[in-house]
Image (tube, rainbow, N blue to C red):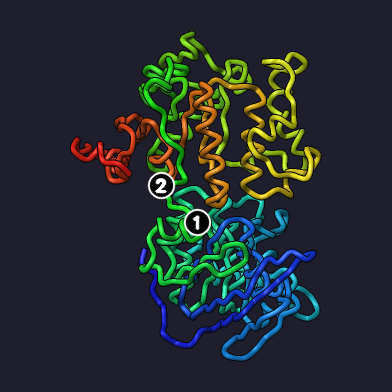
Amino acid sequence: MTVTGLTDEAPVVRMRGITKQFLGNEVLRGVDLDLRAGEVHALVGENGAGKSTLMKILAGVHTADGGTVELDGTPVAFTSPRQAQAKGISIVHQELNLLDDRSVAENVYLGSEPVRRGMVDHRRMAADTAALLDDLGAAGISPRDPVRLLSVAQRQVVEIVKALSADVRVLAMDEPTAALADNEVELLYGLVRRLCDRGIAILYVSHRLVEVFDLSHRITVLKDGALATSRERDELTSDELVRHMVGRSLDALFPDRATEDEIGGPRLRLAGCGNERLHGIDLEVRAGEIVGLAGLQGAGRSAVARAVCGAEPFTTGTMHVDEQRARVASPRAAVRLGIAHVTEDRKGEGLALRQSVRDNALLVRRAAFGRRPRGGPVRMTELLESVTVLARSPEQEVRFLSGGNQQKVVLAKWLAVRPGVLIVDEPTRGIDVGAKQAVYELLRGLARDGVAILMISSELPELIGMSDRVLVLHDGRVAGELPPGPTEEAVMRLATGHAVEPSRTQEAV
């Protein structure tokens, strides 16, 4: 996508030498950042690098301990988000801050409702909200709709409209696509394009490198609270960007693939399996290997996962687990057969956010086996250490953990049932590069212990780098199988229904 609207004018925002400490811990160390009108400026780095803190200083949530912030060349020092908003600076947080039982219009104008004769003017509020929605090409959302009826992508639109209602000039977006499906990401891309065309400066924080290169004009990298580099997008490659973020290349993030002598017999085998969404699926995952499952949005990747784990069972074909024919009619039946499913929706389906790490880690085990757990008792400390969860204690509520540690708790929950087959759907969505590497090492370690892993990912470099084989789905069917290290082009040709050129399937990443 090409984003238009960039100008060569002086920066709208100029931040120089920004420092910040929390309880004696230096979070930001002399960071510089410029934002220009009509520009998407990506801010990237590992968790703890200082991205959110810098963003919150700009938006008035935190005050800097040192350094200066200028708006249109004039020094400013915001002490509250309301002050920043009054100057046209707003932030869209990763965790959406909307009231479910109120309408779209009531959320957009919350705290700044138009008044007529001493009463809230609901008619004007709805009309103004409709105009804002229409301006962004989101006329499918009604101002009178209760927010609870909206999809995650539509809620994200409402957050953006809320910011625009205050005549925003600078918009900071924190992981805006973390919970979105592929087709919803395209909707957000379109919104960003329109905002840039209007001359709005956008500070865009994301862990998804594809988005960073798709959307940004410039990229600033923070590492350990300091500025690592700030470059034009076209001056950086993905590999260089990762090296600035974590000190190593993209290829070094992935563990070695399994050798043939490390791979055992089939643990999961599907033959002609199908249901309303899938047709004639033939698939085999052997002990010790990671099989990647690729395909475009709607091709059936998650449908395969849900069918294998019994959430949406197969109605045709045969399924074997450890060479025994199996009929999986429910998720509980799948767990009892040793099948684990790490869902793509970590917060919505994978975790009980207000429960402790311990309770989450034992959630599936207790539900599936009750007082007769599979494989004997679990040593909680050893379980959490095996997935390197960083928490104050097993009693800490999961909602207070980082995204990477939350994902590790999801994995711990399934490892507690000692699975033979592990299906992971978007296992690194919304976590930083360093945390991704920890998940990669964990998955490869499980494979070495004999677990058969089926991995679904929308990030092709990740899928290619991790997989011992890649199966590609198209329109609910297996379009083909690729050997280790195929090119992204080879995967996409199958995903779009085209034949693969044989000479290219063997090319390494």
Residue nearer the viewer, 302 or 457: 457
Three-letter amino acid code at the position of disc 2? Asp
Residue 508 sits in quarter: top left
Q: Which mark is residue 247?
A: 1
Name the residue located 79 percent from the left edge and 75 percent from the top edge: 119
Q: Give the residue type that dot 1 points to.
A: Gly
In the image, residue 445 sits, relative to residue 508, either above or below, namely above
Name the residue located 65 percent from the left edge and 69 percent from the top edge.
28
Label ID, residue 128: none
Compared with residue 436, is residue 364 higher up or lower down, i.e. above or below? above
Please tell me whether mark 2 or mark 1 is closer to you in this view. 1
Label 1 environment density (alpha carbons within 10 Å; few <14, some 14–19, many ≥20): few
Quadrant where the C terminus lies? top left
Give above or below for 62 relative to 333: below
Relative image position of residue 14 (x, y in whole percent): 57, 82
Dot 1: what SS?
loop
Q: From the viewer's side, name the closer residue of 102 and 431.
A: 431
* Residue 293 visible somewhere in the drawing: yes
Total numbered labels placed on residues in the image? 2
* Residue under numbered circle 2: 251
Where is residue 441? Give x, y as percent.
53, 37
Residue 112 seen in this snapshot: no
Is 135 displayed left or right of 369 in the figure? left
SS of the residue at dot 2? helix
Q: Residue furthest bottom?
A: 74
| Rendering coords of residue 335 (x, y %) | 61, 20
